[in-house]
Amino acid sequence: MFSIAAINDTDSRGQWEPLAPTKEALEFHLTQAYHDGLLKLQAKDYEKARELLESVLKDPLISNAEVDNNTTDGHLLQLKFLVLKNLATVFLQQGSGHYESALRCYLQAVEIENKDSVVWNQLGTLSCSMGSLSISRWAFEQGLLCSPNNWNCMEKLLEVLIAIGDEVTCLSVAELILRHWPSHSRALHVKNTIEETESAPFAPRGIDKLEPKHVRLKFHDKRKAPDENLDEGTALKKLNQNIELQIAEASWAALIDGLLGILLPLNGCGSEVGTGKLYRSGDVRLSILFPPCAEIVMEPVEKKEPTLAPSGESMPPNDNDFQRASSSKEKESNLLEEQPQESGVLVLKVLGAVNLAKKN
């Protein structure tokens, strides 16, 4: 404790008034607390490291430091930036339940110092794992503004743009990567896929054929099939699925009923059978088995041996021949009249089944 008094002032010797600590002394204590927090972080004592770093941030000297052109708070702002950066690391080590706090630390850190590409990279990686693709894209773009040759930001920005679906910007980033590294396999694949013009009708084109993937990034909303949570074995079984449809009779009604029995269950993702689960994909191989030829023929035709007439003579027409011809013509006309009616009823059945499937 220090005090100042005049040498010949005998009356005030018993009144000691301590001096307030100087700003430099307070900065020294804050720096010491920050250093202790780093030691605890290095020792993986995350609770103690968090306590020390948060105490530095709560100090009025740090909390009142503002970002402006004033250079008097430069050291304090730099200390605050380092504390926020390492405190975010502590939150990340404590698990996904603390990701929101880590994100807030990174956002406050880039407000103080926006020229650190490492912090931008960490901010973009964290926000991508949380599903905030817009923040992730902004962070990687800012990282490239700070460091145009930052490979982490370039490659991660390419995958984020694929997840977002921005085809134009994604192609520009792929070309930017290829200018620096012409043999970059991922950039070449993205560029060739987007610029591919020949594709099957109604098939995915361009960026819709790509899926984001990066060893350091996690994408929660990938554009995949609905059953993406299935394991690889089940997915392989789905792709190799075959269905055999046995038709009881050779008629349109039997065929439509059999197809509806297959298509209608596809509205659900799967059904449990016994102890296991039966998954049915919409992409299957269908084999239609018709009844034998003997069952298709409704009225067997009797084979008669032709009667040979002597040469030069013609056989007179028989009355039975006229009757057979007239009866066959009548059957054909009846069939032609019944076919439109039967096809109309089948169309109505199909439309009703489709509407029922849409409602389900």
Image: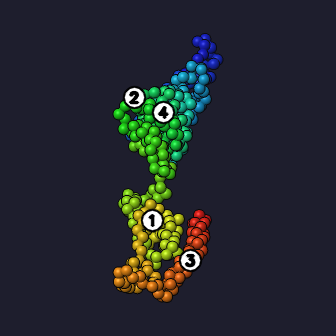
The disc placed on residue 172 is: 4
Q: What residue is drawn where x is 53% and y is 65%?
A: 267
How far is the residue under mark 1 from the one under mark 3? 44 Å
Q: Could you classify mark 1 by the number of other residues whose Cα lies within 10 Å: few (under 14), some (14-19), or many (20 or more)?
A: many
Q: Report helix, strand or loop for mark 1.
A: loop
Do the residues under discs 1 and 2 have CB atoms within 8 angstroms?
no
Q: Quadrant of the C terminus?
A: bottom right
The earlier-in-sequence mark between 4 and 1 is 4
Question: Where is mark 2, residue-wise?
Answer: 180
- Which residue is disc 3 drawn over? 333
Q: Is residue 256 visible?
A: yes
> Quick one: label 1 or label 3, which is nearer the N terminus?
1
Q: Residues within 10 Å of mark 4 (few under 14, many from 20)?
A: few
Residue 140 drawn at (x, y percent): 49, 34
Q: Which residue is mark 1?
A: 280
Find the distance from the CA under tag 4 to the CA under tag 1.
40 Å
Instruction: Name the residue rendered at 39%, 82% in the picture.
Output: 313
Badge 1 amino acid: Arg
Q: Residue 23 location in percent, x, y?
A: 56, 23
Rendered location of residue 315, percent (x, y)? 42, 84
Viewer-side residue, 238 vs 63: 238
- Sequence order check, earlier mark of 3 and 4: 4
In this rendering, is residue 146 above or below 261?
above
Tag 3 and tag 2, C-beta contact below 8 Å: no
